[in-house]
Amino acid sequence: MKIATLTFHASHNYGSVLQAYALSKQLQLMGNEVEIINLRPVSQKTVFKRVPDSKTLLHKVFYLLNKKKINRRFDEYERFINRVLPITKKEYETTQQLTEIKEAYDAFICGSDQVWNPVCLDFEPAYYLQFLDKDCKAKKISYAPSFGKHEFDEQTTKQINAWAKNFDSISVRESRGRNVLNEIDENKISVVCDPVVLLDKQYWETMATDPHIREPYMLVYFLENNHGRKDFVDTLSKMLGLKVVVLTEYLRDITKPYIKKYDASPEEFVGLFKNASFVYTNSFHGTAFSTIFEKPFITVIAPDQENAQNNNDSRKIDYLRKIGLETRLVQNELPDKEALSSCDFETANQKMKVFREESLKYLTNALE
């Protein structure tokens, strides 16, 4: 089949570009011709521009000190997006522009990432296939889209459901996503794994670039819009006797003797997980790659799950419960050294395999 996918493939975020890559690669491995629709809204380009907006003089100084690395990372993202991802030659900015391709594919697949979150700054109705006519013969499929949150106002919820009803097959990434789709029969909604989990460990190993760090290290990958305490870094480093490698820039780290990989390419990002001795993260994809490479890790989440604002922890919690590693979730207190270092992946790997097979079955059936 000739398949088009729609996702946040051009967000300068490791998880975004790698999940876009993983879904297109898996569909290709299934024998399909695949293109990622190169939809890059102006709002998205504004968020992910070369020179970030500096809130204070200190932020400006911090950027200037790290300008070379940050610019290299920007260029590496653009290289990956334009040369590695199978994007369409033409770039689009709006949903309306996509009407010209409505007859060009046998199937359209939306997902993964937060493409079904209408309050995202770079959201477009295209992620609900709103450029297609109702009588369009192409299959309309969602694969693991996320809402980013589990509660919207009544009007937004109704709009989401009205758009989703037009799909032939629906899956979501988090079980709470079913609650948002409250006008659709729950039995018609599958919960599937993130695309990065569709590809097994051996495949990611061949893609990874060696980070060339000779001594054992703890990889720290934190996203500032996620919950979870980052202040355990030095304590963990001392407990485990490991050097610290950080992937994202924070002012608080400016004087720290960490190995700062602010310029890592997507392939180097994968390599850093592959070669880590321990991972400390608040990221879903940081969690996913830790499990793929069977690395001891902890994933920090909000201490108060009921009252946390903009809570996006559900996907991490759901995934780790699904594969039997929910004990790796941390809120306010760290496990002891023995518990930190020992992480049994035998059962988790079996459950990941089942989850992957269930998700592939959904995808196969949706395309038939």
Image (cartoon, rainbow, N blue to C red):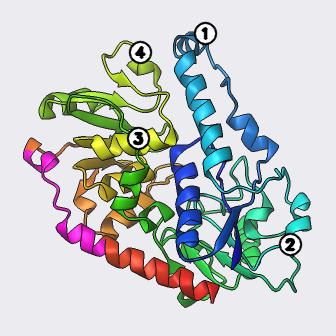
Q: Quadrant of the C terminus?
A: bottom right
Residue that carries the numbered disc 1 in the rendered image:
57
User: Tag 1, which secondary structure?
Assistant: helix
Q: Residue at x 56, y 88 (%)?
A: 365
Q: CA distance from mark 3 to mark 1?
A: 35 Å
Q: CA distance from mark 4 to mark 1?
A: 14 Å
Q: Residue furthest left?
A: 338
108 w.r.t. 289: above or below: below
Q: Nearer the viewer, mark 3 or mark 1?
A: 3
Percent coordinates x, y for residue 314 in the rendering:
44, 61
Residue 308 lies in the magenta-colored region:
no
Which label's residue is closer to the chain start, 4 or 1? 1
Q: Identify the amino acid type marked 4.
A: Ile
User: Tag 2, which secondary structure?
Assistant: loop
Residue that carries the numbered disc 3 in the rendered image:
209
Which label's residue is closer to the chain start, 3 or 1? 1
Say whether marks 3 and 4 touch (CB < 8 Å).
Answer: no
Q: Nearer the viewer, mark 3 or mark 4?
A: 3
Which label's residue is closer to the chain start, 3 or 2? 2
Q: Nearer the viewer, mark 2 or mark 1?
A: 2
- The circle drawn on residue 102 is 2
- Which segment is the magenta one? 338-351
CA neighbours of label 2 inside 10 A, class few (<14), some (14 to 19), many (20+):
some
Q: Identify the amino acid type marked 2.
A: Lys
Say whether marks 2 and 1 touch (CB < 8 Å).
Answer: no
Residue that carries the numbered disc 4 in the rendered image:
254
